[in-house]
Image (cartoon, grey):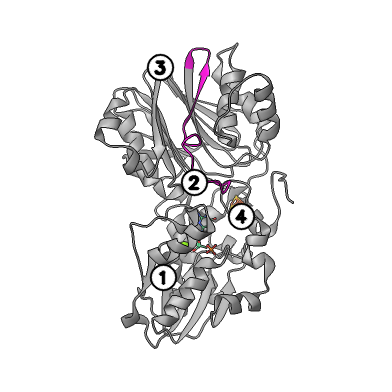
Amino acid sequence: CAVFGVFAPGQDVARITGFGLQALQHRGQESAGIAVGDGASMVEAKDLGLVTQVFDEAKLAALEGFVAVGHCRYSTSGAAASWEAAQPHISAIDNVLVALAHNGTLVNTEALRAQLDAEGVVLRAGTDSEVAAKAIGHITQDTHHLRQGIRWLMEHMEGAYAMVLASPDALYAFRDPNGIRPLCIGGLPGGGWVVSSETCGLDIVGATYLRDVEPGEIVRFNRDGLTAEQGVPAARRASCIFEYVYFARPDSVLDGQSVYQARRAMGRILAREAPARADLVLGVPDSGVPAALGFAEASGIPFTDGIVKNRYVGRTFIQPTQEMRQMGIRLKLNPLPSVIGGKRLVVIDDSIVRGNTSRQLVAMLREAGAAEVHLRIVSPEVLWPCFYGIDTDTRDQLIAANMTLPQMNEWIGSDSLAFISLEGLRASLPDVCHPGFCEACFTGDYVVPVPLP
Ligand code: 5GP
Ligand code: SF4
Ligand code: MG
């Protein structure tokens, strides 16, 4: 998912949030929502669909105020998109409304849900994020002390969360103690602040990157300025390494590391680890393209376009069902026979999860006349499900968890297949300014205990 927040008196915060969410649209395409506070109350608009489908000029203009939070959803539960699950979630503290937007997945909401149920709080969405939002409202009922409530929540929530919360007159941003999902702060030219999942959300609104929200930290923005405090102590650093491979936009900088440069380096490293004899290097659009440039650079094999992507079709992985995913791949990618006919190809993609994409792609490339297809993947084998906000399914769905490398190569239909090593992937991130990554989908080493079957 994507989260975005603004505190900027005198500026059109709904419009700023709308732009921010558009830049973050790649992080979720099922629903979009914006909640705005004007000092006295909060109003919200949200619906299923892309940001530009949910919001037009009139809708944005109707959201008046000086503080806002926004969200784009991609459901990790595998469940179909529902209106109830769209965010931000509004919660009432007596008669004061607050709005919460969440990126990540909580792994322990059952106890909290039961507690809220027992105390008569109505839950409609059935998501971890809704539980967190309602808990905030419930917990602060007596004190109205939001930072205390957030601290209480952080002490009780486990898993991945990068959250933004708006009250009628303040913006809060907070992040789990492992720093699994990204969250950064920018300063607006006219004064005020924005908070965004990625720096590309700052760029689009002309904000200057100030710093990241630190693991375990709560940052509050209001008329007194920016106040930071530690909500819970920081724990072992475990930022999602998959953000660099696939999830984040290439023009974002995460923890000091340019995503684009990381992808290019992944390609260079893979060219050394798993060379191929071929005539052309191609990237699977979009996320495989920078890595393909890197592979070409290091191998000396010319880079070419060769697969055209329909830019109006979204991320196929993000469609929740297997049937929709399979349709999606064919709708999205089409090879260029005039370029690849009779040629031996190295094809670079970011990852193989279930294997659908690669299998269909290899078949399409052969139909289009490719002489050989050598698949090179710039992430290691995905062997374990993600429980922290990316939908990589159960172990029985993960092709690498169920087949050997030669079996995968045969099932996919490639002439050869290789994955970058974990060391190689790490080496592609020389500028990261923190000590550690979550790599659980490759290693099974889960930083927060998870309910493995
Ligand atoms: P597969 O068809 O192997 O299941 O999916 C792999 C393709 O989906 C890759 O080309 C990649 O671009 C995309 N993808 C891989 N992993 C993820 C993920 O965790 N989340 C999302 N949204 N997309 C992914
Ligand atoms: Fe990222 Fe993988 Fe960890 Fe999930 S398990 S947070 S995708 S590195
Ligand atoms: Mg892809």
Q: Is residue 403 left or right of residue 204?
A: right
Q: Magenta part of the protein: which range?
A: 76-96
Q: Which residue is mark 2?
A: 74
Return the residue found at the far right. 453
Amino acid at the residue labelled 4: Asp
Q: Is residue 178 above or below residue 343?
A: above
Q: Is residue 42 left or right of residue 108?
A: left
- Is the residue marked 4 within 8 Å of ligand 1, measured from its CB? yes
Amino acid at the residue labelled 3: Ser
Which circle's residue, 4 or 1, is located before the other in the chain?
A: 1
Q: Residue at x 55, y 55 (%)?
A: 242
Name the one closer to the observer, 243 or 219.
243
Name the one closer to the observer, 3 or 176.
3
Name the one closer to the observer, 64 or 420.
64
Which is the main secondary structure of the residues drawn in magenta?
loop
Q: Which residue is mark 3?
A: 41
Amino acid at the residue labelled 1: Leu
Which circle's residue, 4 or 2, is located before the other in the chain?
A: 2
Q: What's the CA distance linking mark 4 and mark 1?
A: 30 Å
Q: Is residue 63 above or below residue 93?
A: below
- Label 2: element kind: loop
The disc at residue 393 is 4
